[in-house]
Amino acid sequence: MMDVLFDALFALNLLYNFALEPLFLLVFARLLGVSFLNPYSITVFALLPVRLLWLLAGPSVHFNNGVFDQTYQYLILLENLHFTLRTGVAGLLVVYLTRDDVLGRFIDRFHFHPMPIQRLRLCAALFFGVFLLSFVITASWSFGLVNWLLSPRMGYQLHRAGAGPFYAMAVSMIAVSYILAMLAAGTQRRIITTWLIYLPFVFLLGSKGYLVLYTVTAFAFMLISGFRLKLSVVAAVGLVMSAAVLANFGSADLVDIFLYFDYYSNSAYFVQAYQNGLTNLFYGEISSTEIIGAVPRGLWPGKPYVYGSTLLNEMFYPGMAEAGHTPAFGGPILAYADFGVAGVVLLGLTDWSYLTSVLMACLLLTRLRDRGPGFVRTHHFYIFLALMMLAPGYLNFFQFPLNLGIMGFVALVLMGCNLFPRTRFIRFA
């Protein structure tokens, strides 16, 4: 009887984890008076099948009792605590913003010169040029351009060492170019054409995740441009993407495939070691040393390989960080490893990246609702907002203060293109 009760509680634990964010998005859309399917929510819905794989597939083969393993359920409980707190804080933020549009009215005081579509296309071409230069340097560094073109996946996995800053620049610049091109597209046909043009170049980055994100972003721009999409279409796309992810492993053995989803099992190693008294908490060492990642190894040849999140890797996979392999972790395990449950609570109350995304979504969606897509596509602030919200991989590898430098570079190019005198070249663009 007790076993049945625990199994039921464990199932509810998983269901709560899976359903909380979609429920928040429903309330979010109601408060803003926008469609349930919007540029903010579409990524969550499209990736729900993939998230289901993370929750069920990996744990089912990594833990002795599958998804009913007590350590795994404890990790999900910690994640639920984090999700609940950050969702509660975000909900309060949304209620305040919808009641009194303080930030929106403040931003509207600044009357930027509208960004013509031709200038957006010119900027997209310029950033695409920076991407090509960065990519060629990355590919030529140790693997060779031809070899990388023939096997982007191998280049991404084994031949980025030493050229990391150039690869990071390539990822960010093609993302910026893609978003600007999408903003300039306007029609459904042009959005699809832009997506098809960029996809082969995204494939060269070597990460299957980017292919998925660029596809979802194309759907987001269809919504921004006023096209109606059905939730069933997005769900179908999510299922296709999940099937593509599984097919990418090149194996018909589901157990072999599911073993790849080791996010929670990696976290479980630390939880078990800590609960058995085999290790201590890091007491802030993980979060305080993340800043080391902001310094390129080219400027600091002696930069340690083990810092921040890789401190956990080194406990169970010695030498893997130096070899370029950094296993992922599921749940708020980094906060837990630093300060235990108190760290998870603190992260939930101050999850700035999540709160910032909610804040940006509020600003973007309310202006789309009140002013229409034309205003968003030509107003400098909302162009920057679209970059921060929707550009896949933008600033992923740039930590503070390098991320501010990249944002400043993008802002200067955009403003420069807009202020530059009209020439025959710009008319052609």
Image: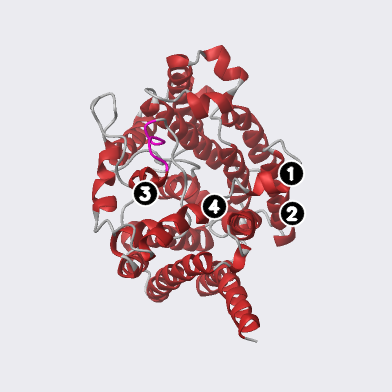
Report the Cα–Cα distance between label 4 and label 3: 45 Å
Question: Helix, strand or loop at disc 1?
Answer: loop
What segment carries the magenta color?
A: 317-322
Tell me the mark number nearer the camera, choosing from 2 and 1.
Answer: 1
Q: Which amino acid type is marked by label 1?
A: Asp
Tell me the mark number nearer the camera, choosing from 4 and 2.
Answer: 2
Question: Helix, strand or loop at disc 4?
Answer: helix
Question: Helix, strand or loop at disc 3?
Answer: helix
Q: Which amino acid type is marked by label 4?
A: Pro
Q: Residue at x 48, y 52 (%)?
A: 266
| Label 1 sits on residue | 253
Tell me the mark number nearer the camera, choosing from 4 and 1.
Answer: 1
Report the Cα–Cα distance between label 3 and label 1: 30 Å
| Label 4 sits on residue | 373
- Contact (CB < 8 A) between labels 3 and 1? no
Structural crowding at the residue carrying mark 4, measured as other residues with C-alpha within 10 Å and reported as few (<14), some (14–19) or many (≥20): many
Q: Position of residue 134 (x, y in %)?
A: 43, 22
Report the Cα–Cα distance between label 2 and label 1: 24 Å
